[in-house]
Image (cartoon, rainbow, N blue to C red):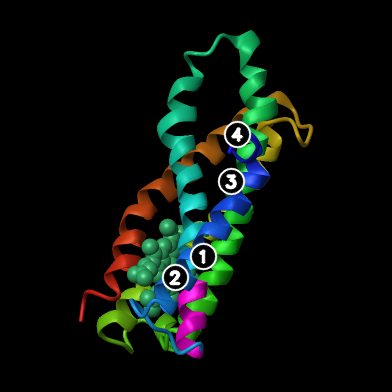
Amino acid sequence: MGAILSSLRNTVIAGVVMAVLLFIVLTQSGVATTSYGMDFWAYIFRYLHVGSGVMWIGLLWYFNFVQIPNMSKIPDEQKPAIGKVIAPAALFWFRWAAMATLFTGLVTAELSGHYLVDALLLGTQTGGHAVIGVGIWIAIIMWFNVWFVIWPNQKKALGIVTVEPDVKAKAARTAMLFSRTNTMLSVPMLLCMVGQSHLA
Ligand code: HEM
């Protein structure tokens, strides 16, 4: 067990193996059934979607609840540990999790019968289709912020791209404000994501 848990790669593989085994036990024991048709793929993509969403919003909340509020408490000579090591690694998983969440979410929308384009045409739908349409729009704005505002500005703020000190300070503030914006938007976004199956 120690050999598995001391390696992140092996830990993730073990988690996937457990999920597959659990799925087999649940379906083969008669506790649950699946058609292995469209509904099965909607289930798999929804699973991948929620998993990548947890990674994305988890890291967004890590930045906002843990890293940003505590930066001022870290002595200047120790700040590079965050700026040069932790933040770039977190930002890697953060932006690619955002991409994976968008992709799996769009596929889920189609497979779940929301007919993506209809759901996005706000005002044309009611019930769950309308609710998920609003949620998807909020999440797309958040995804845009990650890729086209937060990440380009973080590259300047963290010194991945070299810029003048005043540009660097401005970029850090812009990245922080848009990260805060996404934290704010994550609250109504989740309301819609989980609400689509409960609000008729
Ligand atoms: C980036 C764009 C996104 C798109 C296009 C999208 C799309 C969708 C769709 C279509 C569903 C409904 C599936 C169904 O019919 O049950 C859904 C559900 C859900 N989404 Fe998203 N989503 C996005 C972002 C997010 C984010 C950032 C999170 C954060 C964790 C998230 C979490 C969830 C959850 C928890 C559900 C509910 C699953 C269920 O009730 O079974 N989504 N999403």
Q: Amino acid at mark 1?
A: Leu
Residue 21 tag number:
1
In this view, the residue in front, 8 or 121, is 8
Q: Which residue is mark 4?
A: 2
Q: Residue furthest right?
A: 162
Residue 117 in percent (x, y) is at 48, 86
Q: Amino acid at mark 3?
A: Ile
Q: Which residue is mark 2?
A: 25
| Numbered disc 2: secondary structure | helix
Instruction: State how far apart marks 1 and 3 are (Cα).
Output: 39 Å
Mark 2 Cα shell of 10 Å, populated few (<14), some (14-19), many (≥20): few
- Residue 200 is drawn in which quadrant? bottom left
Q: Earlier in the sequence, mark 3 or mark 2?
A: 2
Q: Earlier in the sequence, mark 4 or mark 2?
A: 4
Q: Which residue is mark 3?
A: 150
| Residue drawn at 55 percent across, 39 percent down | 174
Q: Nearer the viewer, mark 1 or mark 3?
A: 1
Q: Residue furthest front?
A: 29
In screen coordinates, is 140 left or right of 161? left
Vertical side of 142 occupied by 131: above or below? below
Q: Amino acid at mark 4?
A: Gly
In screen coordinates, is 39 left or right of 83? left
